[in-house]
Image: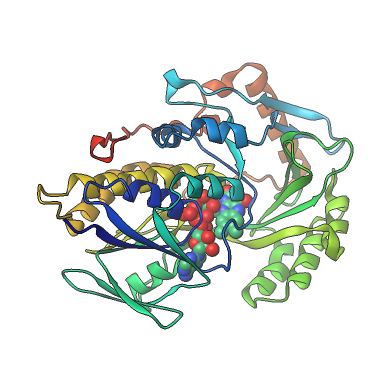
Amino acid sequence: MAPLKVLIAGAGISGPAAVYWLSRLPSGAAITVVERTQAARPGGHQIDIRGHGITVMQRMGLEATMRANAVREEGTCLVRADDKPVAALPAAPMDAARNNRQGITTEFEMMRGTMCKVLMDAAEGQATYRYGVHVTAMEEDTTGVAVTLSDGTSQRFDLVVGADGQGSGVRQLMLGEDAPSVYHPIGLYIAYFDIPRREGDRNWFTFYLAPGRRIINMRGGDRDTHQVMLSVAARNPNTATLAALLQGRAPVDEVKRAWAELYRGAGWHADRIADCLLDEGSTGNFYTHELAQVRMDAWHTSRVALVGDAGWAPTPFTGIGSTIALVGVYVLAGELARNTGEDGTVHVPAALGAYDERVRPYVTEAQNRLPKDGFNKGFFPPETRLGIWILQTLLAIVVWTRLDRLLPWFASDEIDWVLPDYPELGS
Ligand SMILES: Cc1cc2nc3c(=O)[nH]c(=O)nc-3n(C[C@H](O)[C@H](O)[C@H](O)COP(=O)(O)OP(=O)(O)OC[C@H]3O[C@@H](n4cnc5c(N)ncnc54)[C@H](O)[C@@H]3O)c2cc1C
């Protein structure tokens, strides 16, 4: 029985998880991973695992390792300009009886780079990793895919998995150049970066709302740097300069300056953050873009499948991107295992169809956590000081009365969908 020859593009979260699960196929798998960056463990802020993602991670035998590497954060709070908390939700331990439900701060908060490493270590030796390489062409026929790589080499695979994130090159090749855009901007610009930690910085995931539909998030957990996330609705007319710079791919210091100007004077830690943005040495890991969801009618062809952000980037505002990536990969491998004949032949096209069908209701519900018009309409984020005060008051009441336990917005791990069991994977 020949092992399934698989190419995985992307060594983020989905890619290494796919190595783990595909290496457990009854047919066996000969796996190559190509990663566009020059080395493993790229950056990123805290990501987490929720709901069904916890079950998948437990089936990988990783619960203890994830706990040992988790960022310890005390909870989530909303503060006023004078730093007084208005509403605070302490981190809640997972409730296994309620779909592994947790609070907004979870027990499995991890720096993205750490989670990549944990996943990679879990499947050590199961794949050949090639860094600084990406797919430049794919030609698919009934028995496989002929792939050309950026280093000029070509190889044939039984299956190609696009785990290459929101800007997926595999997706672009799969759809072709003339396909309609699958990017759906949600009306929000976002910037992530690190700043030096300062005495008095909280170990909480802290939210501050500023007039003009601006949000500042800061979180540090037990780490040395503080993570900042700035978000501003595209409806704010002052975002025009930033929008033009992003569209024109302007140099990063110009973009940072635009963010600093948008936030200076916004209250709370805004001026400290603006100062850091203007001081080259004070911001690390700076990354900014217009947030968009990737929405597609099919995450596969006969022999190419997309997983994670490549297929369905939901945006960080759903709070569930890494979870649905882990679940998606597990279902993909499970359906490949289930569509393996007695002689060890994997019926790839049938498996990919079943994968898409199985996981679609789950992913769609996760994506639909954002309002249909994103942040282009509606009250949030508030425009005025009065709007902010109303929201603060409502949230304070919700938290004080413990209504948060009933409201879906706070129960961001509960998706009414049954995670399949795949004993074929030995899980
Ligand atoms: C650098 C970085 C930082 C991030 N930071 C955050 C964060 O702070 N908060 C958050 O919620 N989410 C963040 N994300 C997204 C988050 O990791 C995903 O939403 C989620 O975990 C699903 O992961 P994924 O593996 O599908 O995609 P990703 O994590 O995006 O991983 C995709 C991988 O594919 C690689 N890649 C891209 N293009 C190609 C190509 N053409 N060929 C080969 N490889 C390619 C990328 O370098 C990356 O390693 C970040 C992603 C990246 C890449």
Depth check, front residue: 130 or 140: 130
Which of the colour schemes (rainbow, by chain, secondary structure, one colour) is used? Answer: rainbow
Residue 405: x and y in percent read 54, 21
Residue drawn 50% across the image and 47% down it: 121
Q: Position of residue 249 (x, y in %)?
A: 65, 76
Left or right, 245 with respect to 98, comes to: right
Point out residue 158 in the picture as x, y percentages from the top left corner.
24, 64
Please state which of residues 236 and 159 is positioned toward the viewer in this rendering: 159
In the image, farthest residue toward the left? 342
The number of callouts visible is: 0
Above or below, 134 relative to 193 = below
Figure quadrant of residue 109? top right
Q: Please give left or right for residue 311 compared with residue 43 in the image.
A: left
Q: Is residue 329 above or below residue 54?
A: below
255 or 193: nearer the eye?
193
Quarter of the image that includes the C terminus: top left
Furthest toward the bottom, the residue is 152
* Along the line of sight, the residue nearer the viewer: 318 or 146: 146
Q: Look at the image and tell me whether residue 167 can be seen.
A: no
**Residue under the image location 38 percent in, 55 percent down:** 307
Residue sitting at x 38%, y 71%: 180
Residue 189, x across and y down, in percent: 64, 59
Image quarter where the N terminus lies is bottom left
Indicate whether 281 appears above or below 398: below
Outermost residue toward the top in this view: 401
Drawn side of residue 73 relative to residue 137, left or right: right
Task: Identify the residue shown where x is 46% and y is 42%.
Answer: 323
Whether residue 257 is visible, yes or no, is yes
